[in-house]
Amino acid sequence: MAMFEMRAIGSVSSPYTETAQIPKGCGAAHQAEGVLELLPEFEQGLKDIEGFSHLFVIWVFHQAQGYALLGQPPTDDRPHGVFATRSPYRPSPIGLTVVELLRREGPRLYVRGVDMLDGTPILDIKPYLSSVPPEKLRRGWLAEAEERKRRSQP
Ligand SMILES: C[S@@+](CC[C@H](N)C(=O)[O-])C[C@H]1O[C@@H](n2cnc3c(N)ncnc32)[C@H](O)[C@@H]1O
């Protein structure tokens, strides 16, 4: 099996110190502000990032141990395959979060929308550019779970 060595380019300052504090489930809104702090040797790589409103942050679920190929997400009462979910318990424990860029101060990016723990290692940052028209997006089991929940509410 191929293995790849990655390096952390920085870490996240987040208001969340425990996973239980992070909003979960249907309709969870991620409005928390945080800071993506790059190591000084990578600061030059942020040149021109200010022009982008949103960023992809690629990071490591560094506090998650092991993986499960099937799991029941907080958004549903049925199990789904790990690759059809955003579970932290993945064979390659990589997290992906879209954040809004508020401002940059040197090697620090102030962002809104963090859903990771304080101290989470960052592997990469890329500009968020979506070319998928909304009418082409399908939300799979999540849309069905949301619909079941909506129907069960009085
Ligand atoms: C459902 S995952 C989604 C993360 C990301 N948006 C994604 O799609 O890859 C978010 C959850 O991961 C867990 N989590 C966040 N940071 C973590 C870390 N550094 N190590 C392990 N688990 C973490 C928390 O339970 C949080 O609610």
Image (spheres, rainbow, N blue to C red):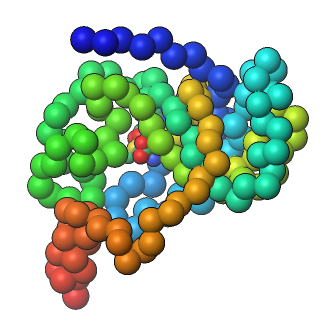
Residue at left 32%, top 22%?
A: 65
Q: Is residue 14 above or below residue 101?
A: above
Position of 24 with respect to 143 (left or right) is right
Residue with the most extreme right position: 106
Question: What x and y, as percent, mark residue 134?
Answer: 43, 74
Q: Work out whether 14 lies above or below 78.
A: above
Specify the quadrant that holds the N terminus: top left
Seen as rendered, the residue at the extreme front is: 131
Q: Is residue 88 above or below residue 145?
A: above
Foreground: 57 or 74? Answer: 57
Whole-percent x, y for residue 141 in the image: 20, 62
Between 16 and 102, the one nearer to me in the picture: 102
Q: Residue at x 35, y 11 (%)?
A: 3
Tell me, yes or no, if residue 44 can be seen here: yes
Q: Quadrant of ligand 1?
A: top left
Residue 81, image x, y percentages? 17, 43
Query: Relative to residue 107, is residue 112 depicted above or below?
Result: below
| Quadrant for the C terminus in the image | bottom left
Q: How far across and down, in percent of the image, does residue 128 sit?
A: 59, 53
Numbered disc total? 0
Q: Viewed as shown, does residue 88 lie left or right of 118? A: left
The quarter of the picture where residue 47 lies is: top right
**Residue that appears at 65% across and 23% down:** 9
Residue located at (82% from left, 45% from top): 48
Residue 114 appears in the rendering? no
Give the left or right position of residue 62, taking residue 9 as reference. Answer: left
